[in-house]
Amino acid sequence: MNQPSDNSSPYERGTTHFGFRDVPAREKQKLVAQVFTSVAGKYDLMNDLMSLGIHRVWKRYFTATCQVKPGDRVLDLAGGTGDIAALLKPRVGERGEIVLGDINAGMLSVGRDRLTDRGLVAGLEYVQCNAEALPFPDASFDLVTIAFGLRNVTDKNAALREMYRVLKVGGQARVLEFSEVTLDWFKPVYDFHSFKVLPKLGSLFAGDAESYQYLAESIRKHPPQDELKAMMDAAGFARANYVNLSAGIVAIHTGYKV
C-alpha cells in the first residue's frame, strides 16, 4: 500500500522518514549513508534486484534524452558508481566536463574505480557533497542530473533549489526516480515484489535484507509524480514536466532555468 508523503521542510518538522520509520531529521543523512556504504560494492546487484535489470534501459533512455552537447559542463548528483557519467561522457566530448557529486565517499570511490577501469579519466571530477548545500557557484552547469538519489535526500525542496541555483540560464535539470505505479492491477504485484521478494533476495545475494527493505520503503515515501512536479515549480524551474516509464515504476522529471 502506498504511504502518504509529506514534503514540508523536515527541519521545520524536526523529524522525517527513513523508510516507514520516523527519525530525527538530522539523523537521516547518517542512516542513509550506512545503507549505501553497505551496498556500495554490490550497487549493480541492488539495482538489478530492485528493477529486474530494467534500470539499465531506463538510464540509457534518461541520458539519451538529456539536453547536452559537446563542451557542456554537467553535474551528476548521487553520481554513485558512475553509470550516468559513463553514458553522458561521449555526449559532452573531450572539451566537456562531468562532475560526479555524492554524499557517500564509498560510492564515489567505487565510481572512480569503475570509470577508470573503462578508460574514462579526463574530464571527470569527483566531489563529496550534500545535494542540499552544493559547494558550487551559481550558474555553474549546463545540465544537472540526479538518478535514483532524490528519494534519499532529507530535504528534497532544498536539493531542488540548489539544482536550480547551480544551473546556467537555459540549462536543464533532470530527475530519474522510482515513482508511483499508474496501473491499478499491477500495484499488488509490485508491492509483493518490493516487500516480500526484494528483502529476501537482498539477504540471499547480498547478506543484507535490512538495506533492501529500506530501499523499498523509501520508494513508497517518495513524492508521486504530480507532487514532485509541483515541488520543481516551487523551486523555480520553468516548464517542469514528467514522463512515466514502465507504467510509472519510474518517472523522468525535467525542468529548465530561464
Image (cartoon, grey):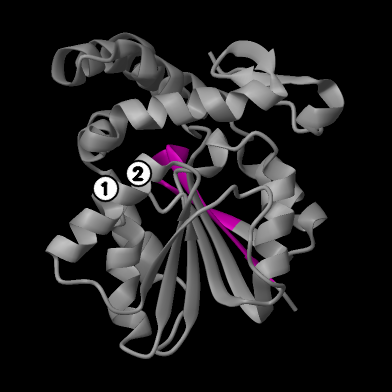
Q: Residue 237 appears at what percent x and percent y?
A: 74, 64
Q: Residue 13 appears at what percent x and percent y?
A: 83, 22
Q: Is residue 233 left or right of residue 127?
A: right
| Snapshot quadrant of residue 187 | top left
Q: Is residue 35 left or right of residue 119?
A: right
Asked if the stretch drawn in magenta spans residue 107, the answer is: no
Above or below, 48 relative to 82 = above
| Snapshot quadrant of residue 170 | bottom right
Identify the main secondary structure in magenta: strand
Give, as a single range, the part of the protein colored magenta.
Answer: 242-256
Q: Marks 2 and 1: in contact by CB < 8 Å? A: yes
Residue that badge 1 annotates: 110
Residue type at tag 1:
Val
Q: Is residue 220 left or right of residue 191?
A: right
Considering the numbered disc 1 on the image, is that residue within a helix, a strand or a loop?
helix
Above or below, 57 relative to 40 = below
> How many C-alpha atoms fall within 10 Å of the one at disc 2: few (<14), some, or many (≥20)?
many
> Foreground residue, 194 or 38?
38
> How many C-alpha atoms fall within 10 Å of the one at disc 1: few (<14), some, or many (≥20)?
some
Residue that badge 2 annotates: 107
Q: Residue 240 appears at what percent x and percent y?
A: 68, 61
Asked if the stretch drawn in magenta spans residue 249, the answer is: yes
